[in-house]
Image: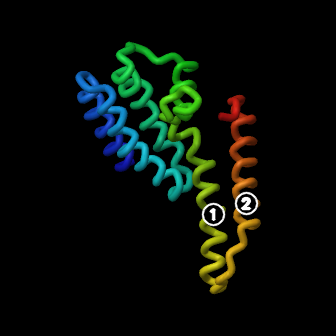
Amino acid sequence: AVVSTQSTGDIDTLCEIADKEPQLAYTAYWMGVRKECSFMQKTTPGIESQLQVIEDSLLQKFLPAITRQAYIQETVREIMALPTRYGGLGIENPSQMAEIHYKNSNAICKRLCDHIIEQKREYYPETCKKLFEEIHDTIRSKLSTTGKKEP
């Protein structure tokens, strides 16, 4: 909960900045809070509920501040979560993607750790390709269960 408090405090500060400089606030979010959330997602199992506090702060404070809108509709929020190459802002819901990021991080790190423990010096590109295909399939299946389209 300490991390959530610090992150929501950072978001509150960014909201104050957004009054005069919304692009600066967005960039600061992108380079700071988003990376902290990404680290927490990849390293902490079961953190979804704690990250929901951050999503609530994003939805109720930050996104309205940078867009100068009083309220962000659910469909608009989903568009903002899309990558910029698809017309979004890349501000994903941190609690929604936490489990996927954690599982993917574990899958990648497990194979690397196994290689280190076994002292393997070989590099197998086809193994990496297969791993990334498995990760992509996991993301695709998660999106299909939530009813969202693949980016």
Say if 67 sits above or below 55 in the image: above
- Residue for point 33% across, 29% down: 23
In the image, what residue type sits under mark 1? Ile
| Crowd class of label 2 (few under 14; some 14 to 19; many from 20; radius 10 Å) | few
Where is residue 56? Give x, y as percent: 44, 30
Give the labeled residue for mark 1. Answer: 108
Disc 1 is placed on an element classified as helix
Distance from disc 1 to disc 2, alpha carbons, whole Å, reads 11 Å
1 or 2: tag closer to the N-terminus:
1
Q: Amino acid at mark 2?
A: Lys
* Residue 111 in which image quadrant: bottom right
Left or right of 5? Residue 130 is right
* Residue at image point 38% right, 13% down: 70
Residue at which label 2 appears: 129
Q: Position of residue 32 (x, y in %)?
A: 35, 45
The numbered mark at residue 10 is none
Toward which corner of the image does residue 150 lie, by quadrant?
top right
Q: Quadrant of the C terminus?
A: top right
Count every numbered label the image shows and give the total: 2
Tell me which residue sits at (29%, 28%) in the image: 15
